[in-house]
Amino acid sequence: MLASDIQYDKYNTLDDFLEQIINLYNDGKFKKVIFYSNKYLEKNPPSHELYNILGITYNKLNNNKLAFDSYSKAINIEPNFAVSYFNLGLLFHEQNSFEYAIENYKKAISLNPNYVDAIFNLANVLKENGEIEKAICAYKSLLRRDNLHINAHYNLGGIFKEMNRFASSIFHFKKVLKIKPLYLDTFFKLGTLYQKIKNFEKAIYYFLEESKINNNNYMAYYLMGNAYIEIGDLQTAYQKFQKALQINPKFFNAFKYLGYIKQKEEDHNLAIQFYKKFLKINPACSETYNNIGFSFEEKKEFVKALNYYKKSIKYNPVYFEAYHNMGNAFQKLGELDKARDTYKKALKIFPNNPDTLLNYGCTNLMEGFLKIGFKMYENRFYSKEFVCKPPRKKLTWDGKKSLVGKHFFVYEEQGLGDIIQFSRYLLLLKEKGAKVTFKVRKDLHKLLSALQADIYLTSNYPNYEEIDFESPLLSLPYLLATDLTNIPIQQRYIFANEKKITFWKKQLNNKKLKIGINWYGSKDDKSFKLNNFKKLAELPNVQLISLQKGESEKDLKNVDFPIKSFDGEIDNDGDAFVDTAAIIVNCDLIITCDTSIAHLSGALGKKTWIILKKIPDWRWMLNRSDTPWYKNAILLRNTNIKNWKPVFDKIYKKIKTNDI
């Protein structure tokens, strides 16, 4: 019988009629469902099942009033008909009438405790109504009846994720995948969860699985890129961000992280380009202006850096990092008053920040305010820029207690030059009556054993009960209240081995002006090209002697002027600087960049010319040609950030006229 020819007279049974009505509904012929149902009800007893179908049909046609009336009639006919309560709950649910929806779902469940759809919808509406704990209980109640209900697990996973209950969220999303290995965005959600708990390897695994299912999910590639950054794989991270942009060229957030990667790789030009692309869509992002400023700072373009730091602060007046970085840029420009004022602003936002206090202290040291500067320099213990442990509390000296007969343990920190420069303070402790032990790298023991005092050198930490006080080496200037007037032993305090001096003297041309040179330090901006010495080498009365060691010795093969070198013959017996010290003593003059050779030569009391970049390390201060640390040293300050020629022209003139 055709649906369009439904016979609704008394010869049709209700079940037959309902079957045909359902077929009409499934075919989408909703108006015929209503027409034939009403015709049937005119001639036959009322049916709760038929009214329920009418309610569903009216709801489908968005006629909420007639849907409500039909469900109500069904319930009046059969008060224990759970399905109509469920559908009435669904009707209220769709209208966001949560209270009535909850009431009807609960009624349906009371009539049929295993009504899974009603329990699921009740849980959903409770969640939407903000009754989260009740929603969780409802989902769990459902899962006790049907542990394979995939949507209950999925929704619980979502709820627990929002509540930051990540372990529970992961449990339920993994249940989803056990029920159905490919379900919605479950892989993606697990990836985000593992990223939140900082298990980046698993996050990457799930994002990769998501990308296999949906290769156009740019967010999966984007978040994968973030995870690769966290595990230090910048190259792969870069590829993932590029893939995200390939899928969605307007996803500008990826440019921010591309800029970050290139900044980490010190490709600052490309970093700036990426950051600027990000700013096109996020023109008020103070963090990005700060990052661009930092890249310009690394390029030594400090004025441009300052402009971007100012823009950063414009959009976020309490952005600590921008003030901190701006202070650094002012310091590198030598504008110390502005640096100090900017650090103060940073510290108002983030009081006691160790990095800012440390840099503020270095500003004071550069200005010659040593007492306050060294006090603030103590913040290095807590700075990410230094690895130096503070003294243990019970072994900390206050700078006042008597040291007579006390065992004072000092331990090394920082570089070779720092150890040489500040080892003079060991002698001062000795003068105050202390028994001094100095823990220092083994290869410096022979050089430092020439300190004219009974100082015990070791490579190990003594037992706690054996010592009275302890301090890292560079804390001694603070503890001993150093200022410009009381720097100890400004002339000679390290002595070369006499036999070595005699040996190396025979290797040199003692008829010429012997100039020891060093051109490369640990940082490129302190160093200069060996070719800068060419004019000096061509003077007939000059012999240049290379004191350079390490990788930069190969520069000697690429010059066309004479330099005496020792081809790896010096300091190769496990003792640092022992031969170098003897060679320095045999020289008439040392010309060096700011490196350990400058400190060794100064500590040996040798006439030393130290070539400095425009704004040097704090210990050399500003605007002076001498240094209170070494009486026989002269500071030659370069005024050009990128060109060393002016300072070498000055050196050439002084040597040629014998002005040494």
Image (cartoon, rainbow, N blue to C red):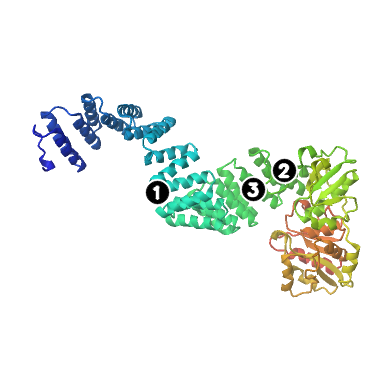
What is the C-alpha distance between the residues marked 1 and 3?
49 Å
* Disc with the residue nearer the chain's start (1 vs 3): 1
Whether residue 280 is visible: no
Q: Is residue 6 left or right of residue 484?
A: left
Q: Which of these two is toward me, 486 or 79? A: 79
Q: Answer above or below: position of 106 versus 596.
A: above
List the residue tagged with mark 1.
Answer: 181
Give residue 421's position: percent from left, percent from top. 81, 53
Residue at position x 89%, y 61% in the image? 497
Which kind of residue does numbered mark 2 sit on?
Asn
Give residue 138's position: percent from left, percent from top. 39, 32
List the residue tagged with mark 3.
Answer: 325
Give residue 403's position: percent from left, percent from top. 88, 40
Q: Nearer the viewer, mark 2 or mark 1?
A: 1
* Disc with the residue nearer the chain's start (2 vs 3): 3
Q: Looking at the image, do the residues carrying marks 2 and 3 touch, with CB atoms under 8 Å apart?
A: no
Which kind of residue does numbered mark 3 sit on?
Asn
Question: At numbered mark 2, what does the secondary structure look like: helix, strand or loop?
Answer: helix
What is the C-alpha distance between the residues marked 2 and 3?
17 Å
Which kind of residue does numbered mark 1 sit on?
Pro
List the residue tagged with mark 2.
Answer: 379
Q: Nearer the viewer, mark 2 or mark 3?
A: 2
Residue at position x 60%, y 40% in the image? 318
Whether residue 605 is visible: yes
Image quadrant holding the N terminus, namely top left
